[in-house]
Amino acid sequence: MHAIILFSHGSVLCGAGENLFSLARQMEARGDAPIVEAGFLNYSQPTFEESFARCVERGATKISIAPYFLVAGYFVNVSLPPKIAAMSALFPDVEVVVAEALKTHELLAQAILNCAGRAQKPEKWRDLLDEAPRFCIDNPKCPLNGTPQCPLRPSPR
């Protein structure tokens, strides 16, 4: 069975990975692959390794790793290969392939054009703080942690 892992860097900012989870759910619901998971290199959860293991648990025999990066820089060329090697050693019967980075695909240009057409002033497009606890994890490295803006552990005002 085929699986896709959307691989991204991750962020210390709570909720930053929610878009990738949403995209994975959309792709799986559309039938792009029977299994679509999101996995992160740093900070965010699940890690790449956790996503890989989850794909195998769900029955994957082939995993396509789709880097969610505009270019195949350091994270794709240096950080990702040892992670793939480690997981391939744990699951030697699973075929692993890696897609190219997003680059300048014509559909990406159209998506950017669509977003530009919906542009608003910054105070309108920022995620509402009330939504953050829905996908926030307690991360001491988050720049909001312990501040009045932190949805999980706000400091006294």
Image: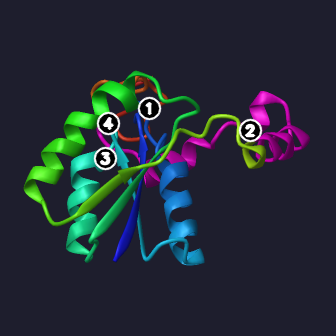
**Circle 3 — which element?**
loop
Which amino acid lies under the numbered mark 4 shown in the image of this protein?
Leu
How would you rate the neighbour count of disc 4 (Cα within 10 Å): few for under 14, some for 14-19, many for 20 or more?
Answer: many
Q: Earlier in the sequence, mark 1 or mark 3?
A: 1
Q: Earlier in the sequence, mark 4 or mark 1?
A: 1
Say if 66 sits above or below 123 in the image. below
Which amino acid lies under the numbered mark 3 shown in the image of this protein?
Gln
Label number found at residue 125: 2
How would you rate the neighbour count of disc 1 (Cα within 10 Å): few for under 14, some for 14-19, many for 20 or more?
Answer: some
**Circle 1 — which element?**
loop
Relative image position of residue 144 (x, y in whole percent): 43, 26
**Residue at mark 1 to residue at mark 3: CA–CA distance:** 12 Å
| Image marks 2 and 4: residues in contact by CB distance under 8 Å | no
Main structural element of the magenta stretch: helix, strand or loop? helix
Q: Earlier in the sequence, mark 2 or mark 1?
A: 1
**Circle 2 — which element?**
helix
Q: Residue at x 78, y 38 (%)?
A: 124
**Residue at mark 2 to residue at mark 3: CA–CA distance:** 25 Å
Name the residue beneath numbered marker 3. 45
Of all residues, the one furthest to the left in this rendering is 90
| Side (left or right) of 33 relative to 127 | left
How would you rate the neighbour count of disc 3 (Cα within 10 Å): few for under 14, some for 14-19, many for 20 or more?
Answer: some
Which amino acid lies under the numbered mark 2 shown in the image of this protein?
Trp
How would you rate the neighbour count of disc 2 (Cα within 10 Å): few for under 14, some for 14-19, many for 20 or more?
Answer: few
Can see residue 47?
no
Name the residue beneath numbered marker 1. 13
Label number found at residue 41: 4
Residue span colored magenta: 109-138
**Residue at mark 2 to residue at mark 1: CA–CA distance:** 16 Å
Q: Residue at x 20, y 60 (%)?
A: 53
Q: Is residue 97 magenta?
A: no
